[in-house]
Image (cartoon, helix red, strand yellow):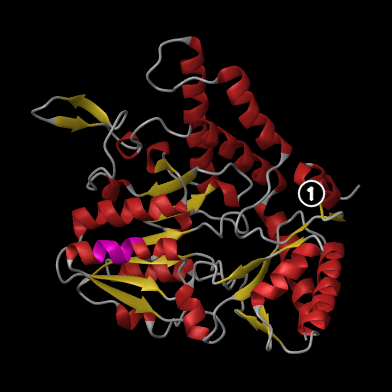
Amino acid sequence: MNLQEQIRRDFPILKTKVYNKPLIYFDNAATTQKPRIVIDTVADCYASKNSNIHRGVHFLSEQLTDKYEESRAIAAKFLNAKATEKIIFTRGTTESANLVAFSFGEAFINKGDEVIVSEMEHHSNMVPWQIMCERKNAKLIKLPITKSGELDMEVFPKLITGKTRILAITHVSNALGTINPIKEIIEIAHSNCVPVFVDGAQAVQHINVDVQDLDADFYAFSGHKIYGPTGIGVLYGKTKYLEKMPPYQGGGEMIKKVSFDKTTFNELPFIFEAGTPNYVGAIGLAEALKYVSNIGIEKIAEIETDLLNYATDKLKDIEDIEIFGNAKHKSSVISFNVKNIHHSDIGTLLDKLGIAVRTGSHCADPVMDYFGISGTVRASLAFYNTKEEIDVFVAGLKRVLGMLR
């Protein structure tokens, strides 16, 4: 049994049939499937360990509190963060972006200041900054993309001014698959004393991320996109910023002392974790991170790059197909359209063949506007996918196009 066969055995859902056909799941950029170890860990937490954490003095509470904080340490190690207090658990990348946009905005952004956001961002890393700019009377500056789906790196340095307070940028584009030169971008920003928030939702499951090597000021990712549970995510932040940022939400655990006269807040990271946290999600995420680490991100990247190249070559042979996102460095995402055929029609008919792809704008309207389209078909691959599945997908696509033409 080869490695890929062993991996596929770890994911129970891959045995599912859709319309009496084996499931081919090519919607991994939206959410990944979960290995048995994650499913079992979540079930065991509820079945034998469940209790609210941090506040209890009884056995179950102390046991689960330890597991929760151990999960924070595992997340810190995964990102190579210096300390666990730099790791904040959130509901996902969306909440992380909202947290930083609100709290950083309150602390550091004033009327007339500027925030740079790229044209390829997911709405979750654009709308929070728009809201903050409207609230603070600041200005949102667009970092444009090119026809190949890459950032315009010639324009980027020219956008930075004495009023620039932060750059919000995706590590990997969910709509195009582009892997941005994040380290270079951060170096340019830092040379102008500009901090950087990185949306890593589409990166951590595909490529090795070392926040110390990148020198990222903020880095966020979501558990459900790296084979973990939904409703859990990680925000890494540098202490020098986090300590100056006001709380994003108020409630239990983020406080030290409350009175009607004054509330004093807790230390990092708890000041940003108001209320009962998703402790089961965090523990499940830790298992997912261990699972991925045991296989090795480098090995995963090798498998996925091979699949991406194989699928791209196969699709290029199809008449009237146009692939959007042809960057030199890509993750395993292929967005495409076929001339005179609506992307939703293609996706709907592929589903009847048991093939799951995503259609639409992928929460990246500015990308679609740039290319003058309403959306694409997006096939996003994971390391549990196979070349045999790609062959079935391509054959199915040709069959669908024959019906629609």
| Relative height, residue 132 to residue 90 (above, below) | below
Viewed as shown, does residue 170 lie left or right of 263?
A: right
The image quadrant that residue 124 belongs to is bottom left
340 magenta-colored: no
Q: Is residue 132 magenta?
A: yes
x%, y% of residue 314? Answer: 81, 78
Image quarter where the C terminus lies is bottom right
Q: Which residue is the site of mark 1?
A: 14
Name the residue located 60 percent from the left edge and 79 percent from the top edge: 325
Amino acid identity at mark 1: Leu
Relative image position of residue 179 (x, y in whole percent): 56, 69
Residue sticking out furthest to the right: 1
From the image, give the main secondary structure of the stretch colored magenta.
helix
Residue drawn 71% across and 68% down? 348
Asked if residue 11 can be seen in this view, the reply is: no
Asked where in the image residue 127 lies, by quadrant, the reply is bottom left
Q: Please count the marks in the image.
A: 1
Q: Would you say 196 lies left or right of 182 here?
A: left
Q: Nearer the viewer, residue 82 or 46?
A: 46
Q: What span is in magenta? A: 128-133
Which residue is outermost to the left?
261
Question: From what the image shows, is residue 106 above or below residue 348?
Answer: above
- x then y, percent, for residue 287: 62, 36
Compared to 101, does 77 lie above or below? above
Give how far across and how far down residue 205 sits, in percent. 61, 54
Q: Helix, strand or loop at disc 1?
A: helix
At 43% from the left and 65% from the top, the residue drawn is: 123
Q: Nearer the viewer, residue 185 or 324?
A: 324
Can you see residue 66?
yes
Measuring 84% from the left and 65% from the top, which residue is drawn there? 387
Bin the neighbour count of mark 1 within 10 Å (Cα to Cα): few under 14, some 14-19, many 20 and up: some
